C-alpha cells in the first residue's frame, strides 16, 4: 500500500513541477515579446527624431549668409547647404524611399550612387516660408528652421574697441 500512495504522490509532485515549469517558460516568452515590442517602438521613435534632427543640424552647421538654399533637380526637391565659398556642399534629397545626402561640387549633377542614406522616408518636401525660414517635410513630420546668419549684432567701430 505504501507504494501506491507514494506513486500517486510522485505523479502529483511531477505534475506540479511541470505546471510551474510551463508557467515559467510562458512568462519568459511573453516577456521577450514585450521587450522586443518596446525596443521596436523606441527604435522607431529614435528614427523619427534622428531624421528631422539631422536635417536641422546640417542646416545649423552650415549657417552662413546665402549658404542654405533649395532647388529642384531631376524633378525632385533638393536642400542645398554650401560649404563656404569653396563651390562644394551638401545636397539632401530623396532617392527612392530613402532620404540621402551627397557631398560634392554644387554645379555637378546629383549622384545618388555615391550618396549616403540618412533615413527612410516616402515624403520629402522643402519650401521657403519667408526670407530665411524653411520648412522641411518628411513622412515623420515637419521641421521648421530659420537661418541665423546676418541676424546677430552687427559690429561697429565702437564695438571693436
Image: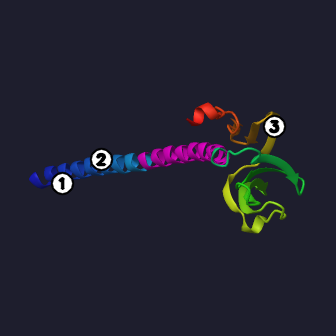
Q: Quadrant of the C terminus?
A: top right
Q: Position of residue 82 (x, y in %)?
A: 74, 53
- Classed neighbour count for the residue bearing mark 2: other residues with Cα under 10 Å, few (<14), some (14–19), many (≥20): few
Residue drawn at the location 62% of the way across and 46% of the way down = 57
Q: Residue furthest left?
A: 2
Q: Quick one: SS at disc 3?
A: strand
| Distance in Å between CA atoms under marks 3 and 2 | 64 Å
Nearer to us of marks 1 and 3 is 3
Residue drawn at the location 84% of the way across and 64% of the way down = 109
Residue drawn at the location 33% of the way across and 48% of the way down = 24
Task: Name the residue tied to disc 2.
Answer: 20
Nearer to us of marks 1 and 2 is 2
Q: Position of residue 105 (x, y in %)?
A: 77, 64
Q: Is residue 31 above or below residue 118?
A: above
For marks 1 and 2, the one nearer the N-term is: 1
Residue drawn at the location 37% of the way across and 51% of the way down = 25
Circle number at residue 7: 1
Specify the segment rendered in magenta.
Answer: 31-59
Task: Say how the picture is coloured.
Answer: rainbow
Task: Name the residue tied to disc 3.
Answer: 128
**Between residues 108 and 50, which one lies in front from this camera angle?**
108
**Between residues 25 and 159, which one lies in front from this camera angle?**
159
Q: Is residue 7 left or right of residue 36?
A: left
Residue 88 placement: quadrant: bottom right
Amino acid at each position: 500500500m505504501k507504494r501506491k500512495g507514494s506513486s500517486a504522490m510522485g505523479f502529483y509532485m511531477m505534475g506540479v513541477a511541470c505546471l510551474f515549469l510551463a508557467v515559467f517558460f510562458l512568462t519568459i516568452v511573453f516577456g521577450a515579446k514585450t521587450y522586443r515590442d518596446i525596443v521596436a517602438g523606441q527604435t522607431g521613435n529614435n528614427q523619427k527624431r534622428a531624421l528631422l534632427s539631422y536635417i536641422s543640424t546640417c542646416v545649423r552647421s552650415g549657417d552662413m549668409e546665402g549658404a542654405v538654399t533649395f532647388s529642384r533637380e531631376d524633378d525632385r526637391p533638393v536642400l542645398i547647404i554650401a560649404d563656404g565659398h569653396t563651390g562644394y556642399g551638401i545636397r539632401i534629397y530623396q532617392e527612392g524611399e530613402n532620404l540621402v545626402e551627397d557631398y560634392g561640387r554644387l554645379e555637378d549633377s546629383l549622384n545618388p550612387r555615391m550618396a549616403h542614406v540618412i533615413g527612410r522616408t516616402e515624403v520629402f518636401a522643402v519650401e521657403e516660408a519667408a526670407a530665411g525660414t524653411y520648412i522641411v517635410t518628411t513622412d515623420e513630420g515637419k521641421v521648421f528652421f530659420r537661418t541665423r546668419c546676418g541676424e546677430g549684432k552687427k559690429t561697429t567701430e565702437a564695438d571693436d574697441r
